[in-house]
Amino acid sequence: MKRTFALIFLLATCMHAQSLHKVGHYIKTHKELLLADGVVFASVSANAWTSVDCGRFYPYCVEGNSILGPHPPASHEWLGALGVGTAVNAWTHFVWHEAVKHPHSTPARHFIWAFDVGPTVVAAQHALHDSQGANFLSNERARCKQGIITGVCNLK
């Protein structure tokens, strides 16, 4: 079975050697766009990671996204984050490629950052809030174990 996959991969690579050249050319000519894609996916991934981490260890962590519900499974968190990242990046790719048609295309291409800043800042704020909430609950758990407080000691 492994040999079959290796053979298919080898044939696909040989058949698409020209495509690899196109990929290299795309990377060289679209550095700013690819950087913007990375920033968006990094921020939404950080948000998903901290939301999943907080929800897994502390049942009092509640998801603020009404579409996902208060305690979504990890797969829904990641699908939601990747969906938002994909939608934002698809829009920025559209704007980038439409800017080429504009007579002053170079300044217009920098406009993609206007679309990326909003979702990136919101996702980063949510990730920070989730991590602060998890740290607070962790400190409360430690205080319960030490007997300092007793009111909220039924933490998971």
Image (spheres, helix red, strand yellow):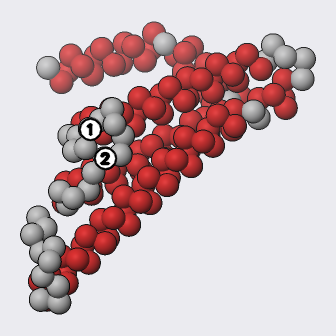
Residue 49 lies, in percent from the top left, at 34, 50
Q: Circle 2: is it few (<14), some (14-19), or many (20+) Cα within 10 Å?
A: some
Q: Give the Cα distance between marks 2 and 1.
A: 7 Å
Give me the residue at 63% from left, 43% from top.
117
Given the current orientation, which residue lies at the most extreme right position? 103
Query: Residue 79's quadrant in the figure?
Result: top left
Give me the residue at 70% from left, 24% from top.
96
Residue 136 to residue 59: above or below? below
Residue 146 to residue 31: above or below? below
Q: What quarter of the picture does the N terminus occupy?
A: top left
Q: Nearer the viewer, residue 11 or 107?
A: 107
Given the current orientation, which residue lies at the most extreme front position? 151
Contact check, label 2 and label 1, Cβ < 8 Å: yes
Does the rendering let one see residue 147? Answer: yes
Mark 2 residue type = Glu
Residue 27 lies, in percent from the top left, at 63, 30
Residue 110 lies, in percent from the top left, at 76, 35
Q: Quickly name the residue at label 1.
A: 69
Q: Secondary structure at mark 1?
A: loop
Give me the residue at 13% from left, 68% from top.
155
Q: Secondary structure at mark 2?
A: loop
Q: Nearer the viewer, residue 124 or 152?
A: 152
Mark 1 residue type = Gly
Q: What quarter of the picture does the C terminus occupy?
A: bottom left
Q: Circle 1: is it few (<14), some (14-19), or many (20+) Cα within 10 Å?
A: few
Q: Quickly name the residue at label 2.
A: 63
